[in-house]
Image: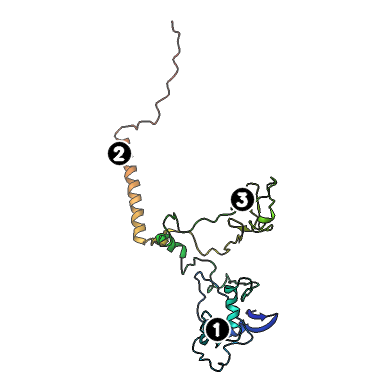
């Protein structure tokens, strides 16, 4: 349940680390909430470290990118040739590693873990919006350009049938399961894929830590309560204003004046004959 890390070499287990040993020691430090890169070090070998220093070798320098024998003699036999063969002779590939997959996840219910690139502790989006000039080159209108979905140029077999591709451009839109090349010569991405040539997953962040901007972001905090004296004073002012209006109307009525009606009186029809 605590996870594990297993290293295999030629389908044989070389090294393993269970997460239980880490959990038992405790996670005292906080998990990084900043955008990070993952660098996979695949330098796994059956023999760790350097071999015993050979005779007549000083073993003071270890450098494969040199013609000096004294700087390379401390390595295992063939080690430098493995690293440099691809640079010197393209027909013979050098060392290559393959990573099947890397799975990284975070628990959205754990307050120590944050999902997203703009967390409350480090509001990256707001910082960039407030310092856009630091993230723009000459000619840019904004730091981050919008994500283009499809419309990348691709080949066509010229038969006029939309969705078909020639063999030379079958991968120009990510292959048949990611996108298709339209008759107009542009890529059209299928569901779940994005980018000009449909090469990227159309993923979304399910946990919106980056909330919309509000007045509180500029330092304005409305009062949570009104003082009792202020409430009583406002109530007295309203009562006095209403009392003054009522007294004024009574004074006008007592003096014999009648208020002007809002509408003129209706005229009675005139009966009679006209010559």
Distance in Å between CA atoms under marks 3 and 2: 84 Å
**Residue 21, horizontal then vertical, whole percent:** 60, 85
Distance in Å between CA atoms under marks 1 and 2: 84 Å
Q: Secondary structure at mark 1?
A: loop
User: Eyeballing the image, is 86 above or below 254?
Assistant: below
Q: Secondary structure at mark 2?
A: helix
Say left or right for 44 vs 120: right
Query: Residue most toward the bottom?
Result: 55
Say left or right for 247 vs 65: left
Badge 2 is on which residue? 251
Between 44 and 50, the one nearer to me in the picture: 50
Sequence-wise first label, 1 or 2: 1
Residue occupying the point 45% across, 13% down: 271
Between 166 and 213, the one nearer to me in the picture: 166
User: Eyeballing the image, is 109 above or below 46?
Assistant: above
Say left or right for 19 vs 273: right
**Residue 275, horizontal then vertical, whole percent:** 43, 5
Q: How many marks?
A: 3
**Residue 96, horizontal then vertical, whole percent:** 62, 75
Badge 3 is on which residue? 186
Q: Which mark is residue 26?
A: 1
Q: Secondary structure at mark 3?
A: loop
Q: Is residue 72 visible?
A: yes
Residue 49: name its quadrant.
bottom right
Sequence-wise first label, 1 or 3: 1
Sequence-wise first label, 3 or 2: 3
Mark 2 nearby-residue class (10 Å; few <14, some 14–19, many ≥20): few
Which of pointers 3 and 2 indicates the residue nearer the eye? 3
Between 192 and 26, the one nearer to me in the picture: 192
């Amino acid at each position: 349940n605590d996870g594990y890390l297993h290293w295999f070499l030629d389908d044989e287990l070389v090294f393993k680390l269970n997460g239980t040993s880490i959990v038992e020691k405790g996670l005292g430090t906080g998990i990084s909430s900043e955008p990070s890169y993952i660098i996979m070090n695949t330098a796994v070998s059956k023999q760790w470290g350097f071999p015993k220093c050979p005779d007549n070798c000083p073993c003071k320098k270890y450098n494969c990118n040199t013609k000096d024998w004294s700087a390379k003699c401390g390595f295992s036999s063939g080690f430098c040739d493995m690293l440099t063969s691809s640079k010197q002779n393209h027909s013979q590939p050098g060392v290559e590693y393959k990573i099947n997959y890397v799975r990284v996840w975070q628990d959205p219910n754990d307050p120590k873990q944050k999902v997203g690139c703009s967390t409350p502790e480090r509001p990256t989006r707001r910082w960039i919006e407030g310092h856009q000039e630091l993230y723009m080159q000459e000619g840019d209108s904004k730091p981050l350009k919008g994500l283009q979905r499809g419309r990348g140029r691709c080949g066509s077999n010229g038969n006029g049938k939309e969705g078909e591709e020639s063999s030379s451009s079958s991968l120009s839109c990510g292959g048949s399961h990611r996108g298709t090349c339209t008759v107009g010569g542009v890529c059209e991405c299928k569901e779940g894929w994005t980018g000009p040539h449909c090469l990227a997953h159309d993923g979304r962040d399910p946990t919106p830590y980056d909330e919309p901007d509000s007045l509180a972001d500029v330092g304005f905090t409305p009062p949570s309560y009104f003082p009792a004296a202020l409430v009583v004073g406002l109530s007295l002012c309203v009562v006095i204003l209403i009392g003054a209006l009522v007294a004024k109307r009574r004074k006008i009525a007592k003096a014999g004046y009648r208020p002007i009606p809002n509408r003129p009186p209706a005229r009675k029809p005139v009966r009679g004959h006209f010559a």
